[in-house]
Image (cartoon, helix red, strand yellow):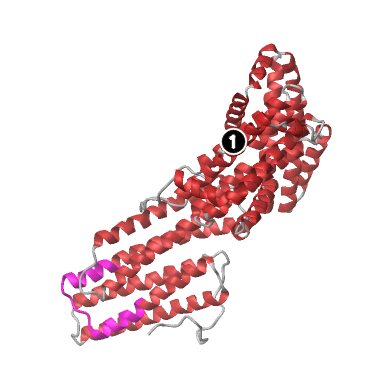
Amino acid sequence: MEISNVFALLGGLALFIFGMNLMGDGLKQMAGSYLKKILEKLTASRFIAMLVGAGLTALIQSSNAMCVMVVGFVNAGVMQLERSVGVLMGAKIGTTMTGQLIAFNITEIAPVIAFIGVALTMFSKKKKVKCLGQIITSLGVLFIGLGKMSEAMKPLRDVQWFRDILAGLSNPILAVLVGIVFTVIIQSASASVGVLQVMAASGIISFQHAFFVMMGMNIGASVAPAIASIGGRKDAKRVALIVVLFESIGMMLFLILAQFTPIIDLVAGTAHDPSRQLANANTIFNCTTVAVLLPFAAHLAKLSKMIIPGEDEQEQCKLKFINEAGYRSCPVLVEQIDAEVKRMIDLVKINLDRATKTYFADKPFDPDEFNNIEETIDFLNRGITDALIRASAMETTDEEAKHVGNLFHVISDLERIGDHAENLLGYANRFLEESLTVSDEAKRQLDVLVKNVYRIYEEACEHLYHPEQIRYDQIYQLEDQIDNIVEDMKVDNIRRLNESICKSQEGLIFVETLVDLERISDHCLNIAQASRIRYHHTVTRAEALEPIRVVQ
C-alpha cells in the first residue's frame, strides 16, 4: 500500500465524518427547538418514548447527539430519569438508519448531489432552504468520502501484515474491543459503522469478523454521554450508565447467541451486498436489544440508582444544572441556563423574604446565613454569564438568540435585587440592634409596600417564562402604583420628623429602606420586559387591573 493510498484514506475519512456532522447540524437547525418540546411532552409512555427517540435520532443522524441531549435535559431537571430510558433505547434504533442510507452506495452521483446542495445554500435567502441545501451538500460530501475510502482501502487486501491483524479478529472478544477503541477515537457510532461497511464492501473484512466489531462500536458510542455527564448531577451520570448497560447487555446477548445459534448466518442472509448485510446487522442488533430490554426499562433505572447511589450534595456555590452536555447542544444549554436562572430567582426570593420580615421581627436576623445565599447569587451571576456567552457563540434559532440576550439583563437585575435585599437586612438589623423605633403608622405603610414589592417580584419572574399581555400590563401598573406609595410614604415621613414623632436617624434609615424597595420594583419591571415575548404597556392609568392590585 503506497503513501498516496494512506493520504487518500485519511482524506476520505475526513470528508465522510465532516459530511455526517454537517448533515446532523443541518437537520438540527431545521428541527430547531421542536426537539426539546417533543422530548418534554411525548415521553410519558416508555413505548412512545422509544419511538420518539428513534424518530428524532433518525432525523438528526446521531445517537451520540441524542444521548447527550437527554443527559443535558435530565441534568437540567426537565426530564425524569425513568422517562429517559425509552428515549435512549429508541436513539439506538434511530442511529442505524445512517448505515441503511450508506448501503445505497450512490457514490457515482455524489458530486452532483453536493453541487445541488451548494447551489441551494449560496443562492437562497430563506433560512430553511439554506438548511436543506446544507443537508443535501453533506449527503454528497459523505458519499464522496465513502468513495475515496473505498478506493484507498482496496490495496489493503493484498497487504500481509493487515491480513494478519484481521485474522486476529476471529476472537469475538478481541473484535469487540477493536470496535470500542475505534469508536472512542472517532466519537461516532454511525461514522464507525460506515467505515466498517466500506471495508466489508471492499472485501477487506469478512462479515463474521465485522459483526463483532460492529457490536463493539455500539458500546464505544456510550463514551460520549459518559463524558457529557461529567460534573453533572447523579441522575445525569445514571443516564450515561444506562447507555453503557444497554449496549453491554446487548453485546453479551449476541455473543451467547453466536455460540449456540446460527444467528450470524441468518443475519448475513438478509442481503447479498456486504454493506447492506452490515447495515441490517446493526439494525437487527439494536432492535433486538430494545425488544428484550424495553419491558425492563424501569429496572434499568433502578439498577443505575443501585450502582450510583445517594443524592446530590447540596453545594451552594456550584452550577447544579449546567454541565458538559449543554456545551454540545444549544437547546440543551439554554434549558440548563433557564434551570440555573430559576434557581437564582428562588434564592433571591428567600433573601428578600428574610430581609423584609426582619423589619417586623423581635430580634436581628443572622447575617452569616443570609450572606451564604448572597455569595451563591453572586456566583450564579458569574457562572450563568459565562454560559450565556458560550450559548451566544453557538448556532441558535432566532427565538433562542433573543432569549439568551434577554437573560444577560435578567441575571443582572436579579443580582441587583439581591444587593438591595442585603441593604434592607442591614437597615432592619440596625433598627433592632440600636433599639430604634418605628411608629405604628410607618409600620403599617411599610407592610403594604413590602407586600406589593413581594407581589411584583413573583409576577415578574412568572411572566419571564409565561408571558401574557394582560400580566405585563398588570406588572407595569403595579410598579407605577408602588412608586406612588413610596412618594406618599416619604411625605408622611417628613411630616413625622417635623412633628417629632420619630428622630432624624430613624427617618433617614426609613427613607433608605423606601429607596431600596422602589429600586427592587424597577428591576422587577426590567425582568418582566425580558420575557421570550416582549410586550409593551397597553392600558391607561385609569383602567382597573385584575387580579393584581395594590395590597393594603
Q: Residue at x 64, y 36 (%)?
A: 189
SS category of the residue bearing label 1: helix
Q: What's the residue at 67%, 30% (across, down)?
A: 260
Query: In which quarter of the view is residue 3 placed?
Result: top right
* Secondary structure, magenta segment, majority class: helix
Residue 286 visible in the displayed image: yes
User: Hey, what amino acid is under mark 1?
Assistant: Ile
Label total for image: 1
Residue pointed to by mark 1: 219
Q: Nearer the viewer, residue 261 or 67?
A: 261
Magenta stretch: give its range.
424-450
> Is residue 230 shown in magenta?
no
Q: Is residue 443 magenta?
A: yes
Residue 439, how many percent across, how many down?
Answer: 22, 83
In percent of width and height, residue 393 lies at 55, 47
Please state the horizontal and vertical placement of residue 252, each as a whole percent of the image. 60, 34
Q: Vertical placement of 501 versus 379: above or below?
A: below
Residue 517 located left or right of residue 125? left
Tell me if 213 is positioned left or right of 525 in this view: right
Viewer-proximal residue, 339 or 272? 272
The answer to which of 200 and 490 lies nearer the viewer is: 200
For this view, does 117 lie left or right of residue 83?
right
Is the C terminus in the top left, top right, bottom left or bottom right quadrant?
bottom left
Q: Residue at x 33, y 59 (%)?
A: 374
* Residue at image location 49% in from the left, 51% down from the top: 75
